[in-house]
Amino acid sequence: MTPKPAAAAVRATVYGYPRQGRNRELKKAVEGYWKGRVTADALRQAAADLRRANWGQLTDAGVHEVPTGDFSYYDHVLDTSVMVGALPARHRAAVAADALDGYFAMARGTQDVAPLEMTKWFDTNYHYLVPELGPDTVFTADSTKQVAELTEALALGHTARPVLVGPLTYLLLAKPAPGVAADFEPLTLLDRLLPVYAQVLADLRAAGAEWVQLDEPALVQDRTPAELNAAARAYRDLGGATDRPRLLVASYFDRLGEALQVLAAAPVEGLALDFTGAAAANLDDLAAVGGLPGKRLVAGVVDGRNIWINDHQKSLATLGTLLGLADRVDVSASCSLLHVPLDATAERDVDPQIRRWLSFARQKSTEVATLARGLAQGTDAITAELAANRADLASRAGSAITRDPAVRARTSAVTDADGRRSQGYAERSAAQRAHLDLPVLPTTTIGSFPQTDELRAARADLRAGRIDAAGYEERIKDEIREVLSFQEKTGIDVLVHGEPERNDMVQYFAEQLTGYVATRHGWVQSYGTRYVRPPVLAGDISRPGPMTVRWTTYAQARTAKPVKGMLTGPVTMLAWSFVRDDQPLGDTARQVALALRDEVNDLEAAGTSVIQVDEPALRETLPLRAADHAAYLAWATESFRLTTGGVRPDTQIHTHMCYAEFGDIVQAIDDLDADVISLEAARSHMQVAGELAAHGYPREAGPGVWDIHSPRVPGAEEAASLLRKGLEAIPAERLWVNPDCGLKTRGWTETRASLENLVAAAREVRAELTAGNG
């Protein structure tokens, strides 16, 4: 339906915006500060410049109400911990000495003090720093950052709305602090936390805030009656406060379900809901609860997580229906635009036909503004925009780029047998032990070694024509030889070639597969100053030729020890890309799996005895509602087995996962039927080893003993202590010794020291096992 013009003024808004700047200015400023090349004042000025530019871009696009408080030097959940005074005891002295250095110490750790644990933000590829709480936690309000950024925006003449992580989500994301009983429930601290939020709200009102947004994405997950009651109590108390701005409670990433009735009945002035993807069910659910009479509804009808252009006619139909369900309807993206790149117009290297289908943060802001204008003034006011949108959608639907009959025929011919190894694990394990002849507690790394300035310079030189392909390859060979030499001298048992030729674990493969499109400027924040460029999955996937065989065999020819072949698995290839929205994800996963299966088979034929297929995104992509888990895990695990099912019994298949709640997917990990899995475990103190043991996981596992997302170097005894803890859950004959993740982001100095300590720890514990057996 075409909506009639809205009676009230319609605002266009967004919940958040990319922080990094057009040329990743924030990354450069923060890392410059860490290295002592940028002063604290210069860092603060760079951040203020970026905020001003972001608000200006939004206003120029036609957005009426800009967000504040969403900007962060590192992570918005860490900012919330600072706001409520929930600082880990081990970091309080550093924060007291220097707030900025203490902030980064919590994020990254120091040589003497471990950082906060890091994990995925719901089912996105953004990582947040997990709050650590306990029964003795004392909350205190510190609204300095939130008030300062609001004041900045107001002084620039913007209508601004502060955005905060809501109290329910903050507590539901938290974990018990070290030394606190594992069964401690942070949500029991709600009554202690709410007065602190009330004080922050009062401070923001005093600073000029008319509205404050409280983000509660945790409420789209399955919640117990007790948790829903806590949500009702929280917003009854906050809504009942007299000294506060108007409250907009936002939730996104999925349908609200049972929590919608709770929030609809709360004494708050507005709700912000997602109406894209699975969250489209919010439309019917909202009608079922009687709508939001007397309240503001911010409707997220533009997908904030993917990069395809919006279907304006479809969105206007949704908005037209919503006009009858709330006192006032405003228009937004479905969630913060933090999860998409900044500007599609910068992608001059992308096929112009495909570029017209792309919508990054700046384009989505314009889409939101266009829809708000159409809702407020009627579709006659946006006739040209609607015509252009229809043409772009038709271009994509009819393009030959999106469909390859040969790929679709091959996918349709897949049988269950294609996804099964020829022998069970017990038989395979015996064949692999005989073939590889590894010691007890074998040591290895996850795959990548440091991406040095010299490697980046070599790639830049190749692009600029300063060296030719032959010269570039010589530099890559030099690096591989150095990586192999170091590993052999250190005593690592299963080697890697270090991946010096790879720019990114997904992009490297995407650039060699048909159907993928790589961007040059499509940076998205993963964590802190770590940005990635997710490729765009635009069409059907196939592999024109081998992608990794040459470099793996080059490395294997230079050592008698096994060298792992390294691939990125099909689920991660999807999760860390911007996927197509015009076919089921399972169909796309099978296409990717078949392309990778060809690579696995070629590696084996070339003499590679150990092949690792990384799936760090398996848990990350798990749907937020339990009712949707089984269908997802069925195609996700099937695609992994389809990738690896064609190898001989004596070829050892590894996989790797990091920074997720593995306990939720232990059965799926089992269903992958990998011979060895390496997992993040250092920051969570070997929690996953216990989870695997409780499940009865029958295969080999390497829970990490070195947290590579921190610059600190763990001592040999620290690694040995973690290894002993792993042995409490996993028998020695099935336990591997490895870091948490790849070493791409680390420097060579810390890498050498840490791996030497890791090998020393393995030798120490091996000796203890031998002595114990004697």
Image: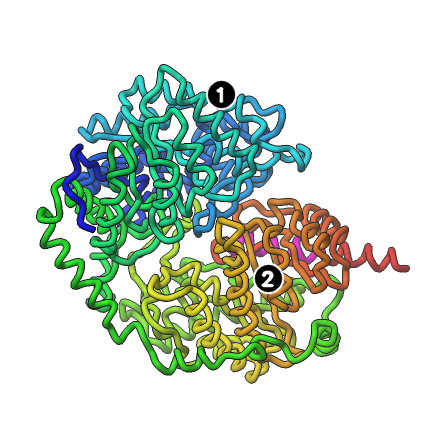
Q: Which mark is residue 140?
A: 1
In magenta segment, residue 752: yes
Q: Which residue is identified by label 2?
A: 445
For mark 2, does the 10 Å Cα neighbourhood hold few (<14), some (14 to 19), or many (20 or more) residues?
Answer: many
| Residue found 60% across the figure and 45% down from its top | 683
Viewport quadrant of the C terminus: bottom right
* Numbered circle sitting on residue 355: none
Residue at the extreme right of the image, as rendered = 774
Up-down: is 73 above or below 575? above
Residue depth check, mark 2 versus mark 1: number of the one nearer the observer: 1
Along the viewing direction, whichever of 524 and 400 lies nearer the viewer: 400
Please provide the residue range marked out in magenta.
747-760
- Circle 1 packing at 10 Å, graded few (<14), some (14-19), many (20+), is some
From this viewpoint, is residue 378 visible?
Answer: yes
Q: Is residue 79 visible?
A: no
Q: Is 735 contained in the magenta span?
A: no
Q: Would you place residue 621 above or below residue 429 in this image?
A: above
